[in-house]
Image (spheres, coloured by chain):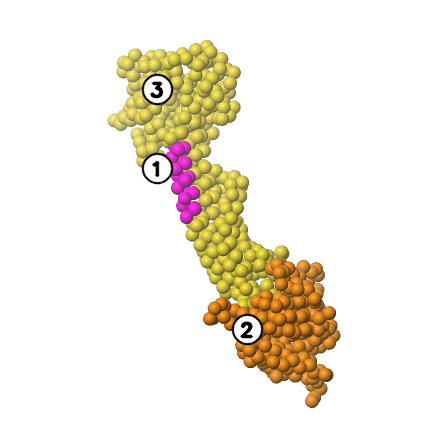
Amino acid sequence: MSFLLRLALRNLVRNARRTVLSTSAIVVGVFYLVLGQAMVGGVEEGIVRSAEDGLTGHVLIRAADYPDEGLSHPVDVLLDLPEPARAVLQERARASVPRTLFVATLVAGADSLRLRGIGFDPVEDVKVFPRETWKVDGKVPATAEDGVLLGAGAAAMLGIGPGTRVVLQTRTHAGALNALEVPVSGIVSTGNIAIDQVSAYVPHALVAGLIADPRPSHFGVRLAHRDEAPAVAAALAPALGDGFEVVTWEEETRELLRMQKIRRRALDAFVGVLLLMSSFGIANTILMAAHERVREIGTLRAMGLSRRGVLALFLMEGGLMGVVSGLLGAGLGGAGAWWFSVHPLDLSEMGAKGMGGNIQFSTWLYARFDPAMLVAPVLISVAVALLASAWPARSASRMAPAEAVRAA
Amino acid sequence: MPICELRGVSRTYGSGPAKVHAVREIDLVIEAGEFTVFVGPSGSGKTTLLNMVGCLDQPSEGEVLIEGRPTAGLSDRALAHLRAERIGFIFQAFNLIPVLTAVENVELAVQLGGGGDGRARARQALAEVGLTGLEGRRPNQLSGGQQQRVAIARALVRKPALVIADEPTANLDSANGAQVLELMRELNEKHGTTFIFSTHDAMVMEHARRTVFLHDGRIARDEVRAAPAPRAGEGR
């Protein structure tokens, strides 16, 4: 068998240019499969992370029928958590923090911008909404006196930076107009378009004054693991009773993830077409090889190689093409995936062109790289090559040795 | 026991009006150690007969026995095994595998027969045909005579009972042809290997101890020479 393998390898090298051409489509297909899956996986992970770390957490408690379209954050219904719900959170959540989302107009000199105010607890908020990806110019406000932390996109639109004094206008819980002049303590890039483009973090103490009510509009909940979210949401719902709504990170990202699934299917279809094309190339190569080597086949048969042996030889040639091209494609795709898992693509420009609002989408596109993801594409490549070689190999194995041995 | 026996062997190709009788009702016994040549014009059935003796083809009628064992009904695998173990082939066009070196071409025969120590045996076989030092060359780096020597080494490396040579000198000049024939006769005498040739070449016929003349697929004459022809260089 090892000698046949050596012979198969030599036969492939014999017409190296043809072999390379035939296998290049598989290399490209596997490359796209690996890199594409890594990028799509990275986008999915980015969507989930953006929701988890941005505005939703693992579980979000808000008022019933809370609007989730556009930049709309009413403060007419604010929350007092019932004791049973507090007990559930105490028992099952790693942390929970209050937040108040409100719509405000931020005025800086002659310019103004409508944005989302995120009322937050400067100390506790980080327990639910981590800040590892944050890049802050200036500082995160620690007290009401420090002022507001403005999203980088909004700051760029207004042309302001840390230290600028701005006026924050909004309506109170009762609907009256209210305004405060505050300093900008810092400019933040969180990597979440929904925050960076149209949001400002405002300490709770300031928000309580602005809306004339200390109660929050939301509670964000962090769990030990995101998979626990549906169960905790199910436990919270009866504990909260009417007037509340519980949403999970999964529900918040469902639409975006559904779009990603479509993207993944489109990628699979594209790769499928490439692999189909490459299978024709490989079948053609093996068929040509069989026709060019009729006398060799006859000689091998005369020397004692059985039909099955001839079949094995040509399948080995096809399989080797699959292995080599699969490994090459997976290697290149894996290298690309690893690179983008370490060096993300910056999508902030795309975000600046209108992906703001409630769509939580990371401006950093990381690839999701896992060495295990390379195995299936290589196996697929080998399977395609073997299937493509099967018919020509069978054709070669069925040549009559007496005729083949004297072929021109 | 004869090495090969043909009983009432016929081989036809095609059917109906296009039916061709390549070989008709051949009865032939080849004894061990013979140096036999099939002679006849083109289309006389020499190659067809060699194919059936070499188990590359099966007769339409009659039976072929190799070392007393009928070959009819043997599976493809069993026939392949029989060829690997007991029969060596030498072809007019040498039929070496171009991607393998001389020693690998010979080693291939050992490997296909399932034998061990293939490389050493291949080197020894090449030495026996006078190709020491050329083991690493590929067929396209060898002369026609050297290629045919590699083919002879390949045919003999497993020490088969029977070697079938189809026009082995047809692609060689007379000097190389004579050397190759001399080599085969030496091996025939040294190892007692049975050789069966097909040829148009008078020089080959001179070396043969037995000549089977074929005409229109039948044996027209079967001559056995009492003593072998003088060797090249011995003079006549």
The foreground one among B225 and A186 is: B225
| The color chain A is rendered in | yellow
In the picture of the structure, the residue carrying the numbered disc 3 is: A66
| The color chain B is rendered in | orange
In the picture of the structure, the residue carrying the numbered disc 2 is: B22
Q: CA distance from mark 2 to mark 3?
A: 94 Å
Rendered position, A121 above or below B211 = above
Q: Residue A152 in the image: state x and y as whole percent.
A: 36, 30
How packed mark 3 is, by other alpha carbons closer than 10 Å (few <14, some 14-19, many 20 or more), is: some
Q: Tag 2: residue type?
A: Ala
Quarter of the image where one finds residue A11: bottom right
x 52%, y 46%: residue: A379
In the picture of the structure, the residue carrying the numbered disc 1 is: A350
Q: Residue B85 in the image: state x and y as whole percent.
A: 68, 64
Both labels 2 and 3 in a single chain: no
Range drawn in magenta: A256-273
Q: Secondary structure at mark 2?
A: strand
Q: Are marks 1 and 2 in contact (CB under 8 Å)?
A: no
Both labels 1 and 2 in a single chain: no
How packed mark 1 is, by other alpha carbons closer than 10 Å (few <14, some 14-19, many 20 or more), is: few
Q: Tag 3: residue type?
A: Tyr
- Judge left or right: residue A173 versus residue A342: left
How packed mark 2 is, by other alpha carbons closer than 10 Å (few <14, some 14-19, many 20 or more), is: some
Q: Earlier in the sequence, mark 1 or mark 3?
A: 3
Q: Report the chain holding disc 1.
A: A
